Every structure is written in structure tokens, then in C-alpha cells.
Amino acid sequence: MDAKDLQILRELQNDGRLSNAELAERVALSPSPCLRRVRLLEERGVIEGYTAIVNQKAYGLPVTVFIQIRLDHHSTEAAQIFEHAIQTIDEIMDCHLMTGETDYMLRVVVSSLEEYEQFVRNRLHPIPNVASINTSFAYGVVKKNRALPR
């Protein structure tokens, strides 16, 4: 990727609804070369897709929870079982494999504390090999950047 590709990516991260003509103008290219570059970024997997950013509270899911999961033993099978199970749970927005004492970090969204309790009881507790669940509730957002740095 060169500097022009990075400019294109920055603009699209800030406004994914830009037309090709608007994008080309912002990055000082003519429309055809700009579109070729965008298509190449898509083909190479640098641009994975396009989506709408939805206000979580307005959508009815105002509670964000970060959950640290530790498995009771570390085997390929235990990890596969856990990772397969969390793929099917809609409330889990992100799952990261971690180093240190925590095996996984989840970001979960729910409508209320009561819904979170039901989520833990009915969705997390049944997953085999979970040794501990450590919960932290987010009560505010200081920074939420959607554009990658560079």
C-alpha cells in the first residue's frame, strides 16, 4: 500500500457512503484510477466490507459489558468448543484470544442488568470448560475510533 491507498482508506473509514467521484476528488485522483485502487483494496482483503454504524443506545442495547473468560484447561478441543459456542451468541460483539491470566476477552451488549444476568446463566454457564467469568461494566465511552491509525 502506498500513501494514496492510505488516503483512500482514511476517507472511506470516515465516510463509507462516499461516491467514487467524491472519494476521487478528496484524494486527488481521477475517478477511474480511484475506483481501480478501491477494487484492488477489496480484492486483497484490506477492505473487508461496508456497514452502517448504529447507535447502540437508540437501538435498545445501552449496556456494554467486558467479560474475561478463563478456561479450566488448555487443550485444542476445549478452545474449539468454546470458540464454536460463542460464534452462535448474538450478544457477543467481539471475542479476543488473550495472553496472561485471561484466555478470552468478550465485548457484550445487552438491554439491561437483568438481561445480562440471563445471558450469563443461559448462554455462558452452559459452555463446557469455562473456569471463570469476570465481568466489568462500561459506564461511559471516552474514545471510540473507527478509523485505523496511520
Image (spheres, rainbow, N blue to C red):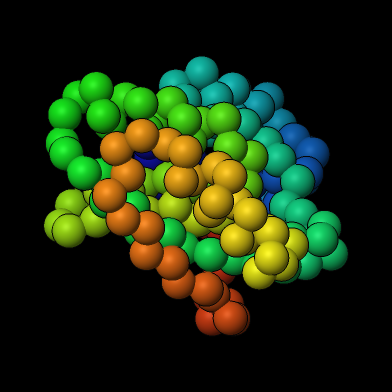
Closest to the observer: 75 or 46?
Answer: 75
State the quadrant of the N terminus.
top left
Location of residue 82 in the rendering, given as x and y in whole percent from the top left corner: 37, 33
Asked whether residue 25 appears in the rendered view, the answer is no
Location of residue 61 in the rendering, given as x and y in whole percent from the top left corner: 74, 61
Residue 133's place in the image compared with 144, above or below, is above
Location of residue 115 in the rendering, given as x and y in whole percent from the top left corner: 69, 59
Closest to the observer: 89 or 96?
Answer: 89
Image quarter of residue 78: top left
| Residue drawn at point x = 58 percent, y = 45 percent | 122
Q: Which residue is farthest top?
A: 43
| Left/right of residue 37 with respect to residue 150 in the rendered view | right
| Left/right of residue 57 with respect to residue 3 in the rendered view | right
| Residue drawn at point x = 16 percent, y = 39 percent | 73
State the quadrant of the C terminus.
bottom left
Asked whether residue 121 appears in the rendered view, the answer is yes
